[in-house]
Amino acid sequence: MPATSFAADEAKGTKPNILLIVADDLGYSDLGCYGGEIQTPNLDRVAANGLRFTQFYNTSRCWSSRASLLSGYYAQSIRRDVLTGDFKPKAGNGNRPRWAQLLPVYLRPLGYHSYYSGKWHIDGEALQNGFERSYDSTSMNGFFHAAGHMSDGKIVPPGSKDDEYYATTATADFAIRHLTDHAARFPDRPFFQYLAFNAPHFPLHALPADIAVYKDRYKSGWDSIRKERLERMKKIGTLNCDLSPLDPEIIPRWNLKEAELKKRISPFEVGHAVPWDSLNPDQKQFQASKMEVHAAMVHRMDLEIGRVLDHLKSTGAMENTIVIFLSDNGASAEEIIRGKGHDPAAPMGSAKSYLGMGPGWSSASNTPFRLHKSWTHEGGISTPLVVSWPAGIKARNELRSNPGHLIDIVPTLLEVTGAKQPDEVAGLKVPPIHGTSLVPDFTKDGSVKREFLWWNHDGHRAIRMGDWKLVANGKSPWELYDMGQDRSETRNLAEDHPEKVVELEKAWMKHAAEFNALALQDPAEKGKRKARRKEEN
């Protein structure tokens, strides 16, 4: 094991346990410890006992983030996202090459037992990728029923009444069930629990008691909430930049049109991130009530995380457990209807309703950044990252400003556990992992050095090299920003530094070609396996 590792296993005779928690569509500023007003005391305590990363990134979308998170590779290189422009492999968002294994496979030789609960959204099944127990809630069009959910490969009974089931609670229940069984059967073995909540992904569904906590909290509107959050961020030190302007003309291309929203959802629904004061009183009331439900979903997720953490404390496992929390992408501006549809007469947040945050509140959740889930501006790709490990990280309530990415989680956990990737899988050479271990950052901020970070999703592109970031929406021209001075991307410097635009564009193209080549590096599998249908969210 490298000398820089924080080897709690050497001190205690056991490898560290791992609890990896992922939220779905959580905005950068939704947590209290990142400046939000939503009550998240359990995650705030995790942060107080460890580290908060202020420049950590995801891929901007659900399925690509999960693939990168558990593999350590850029999703495009393992066929879990498509490349655009001159690079169009026939395998996009499909099956991974056989050499692209997931973290539990690497941990198993060291005696780890791996468990998964929540949203999968990766090709294959969890039980085929190193997990021994699983609860899969990926097939989901609502939080109040378990239709299509699987436990250890078997269908979960959907339940008879809406008030008997809530997905966020069930996700924690199954994780606790896995961990209880582990403590009884393997008390001397380490575990990896992957806890992937569906919350706060649409539809906006929450328990009435949780919604009541936030009654009237959002009547001031998204413009006011954005300002409040940024002021708190500046006070706690997570960010110090300007507030980005709203982008009212930019919405997901698959959203319902404004007329359809008013017809099928409510005459008070709003399809664009317009200034709050431009809304009439009925629109303001309707929009404020939607944010109450989103806050309640985040609030409930935190409570369920608290139950899992309490269970670890009760079994004595907490001291030597690495807890990692992050989000798969930024908050969502999506406004669509799925499943059994939306009943306009149903109480907001109930099982028969089907609502999305919309771009106004998504902009607030992503404060102070621009745009939303699926874009590669900061609002789409920035995630909170909270890390705690009582036995292995001495830092308490400290910030880390080093840029990082989901691809860094696997190499970090390989280092702290001593696990290794094989040189070959099925006769195929395993390429070097793309991520960089964050272990040096556990001791000192700025210890991790990297050449670049790279994005490409839904036609949106970006690359970051040092403090320079080049980004473009679809076919729009490249924009250039200095992240050291303008994290909220308010001052486009492309015309001032054309030579830097050319330099970064060449780098983006170079890495696109590299990832394209990797995606096609498993010819034995090409065309022989039917890829899963394209997941839209």
Image (cartoon, grey):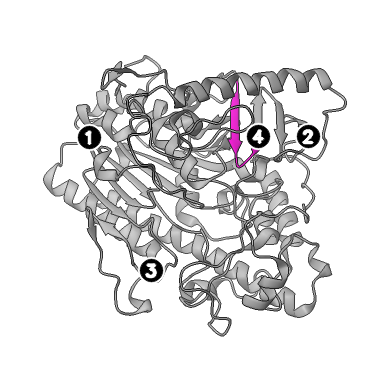
Residue drawn where x is 12% and y is 46% of the image: 185
- Give the CA separation, mark 1 to mark 3: 30 Å
Mark 4 vs 1, N-terminal side: 1
Q: Is residue 41 visible?
A: yes
- Residue designated by label 4: 461
* Whole-percent x, y for residue 520 in the image: 44, 25
* Whole-percent x, y for residue 132 in the image: 21, 44
* Whole-percent x, y for residue 369 in the image: 70, 45
Viewed as shown, does residue 10 lie left or right of 5?
A: left
Residue drawn where x is 60% and y is 49% of the image: 373
- Residue designated by label 2: 477
**Residue 112 numbered mark, or none:** 1
Crowding at dot 4, Cα within 10 Å, few <14 / some 14-19 / many 20+, comes out as many
Q: Secondary structure at mark 4?
A: strand
Q: On the rendered image, what quadrant is the N terminus found in?
A: top left
Q: Secondary structure at mark 2?
A: loop
Is residue 466 on the magenta stretch?
A: no
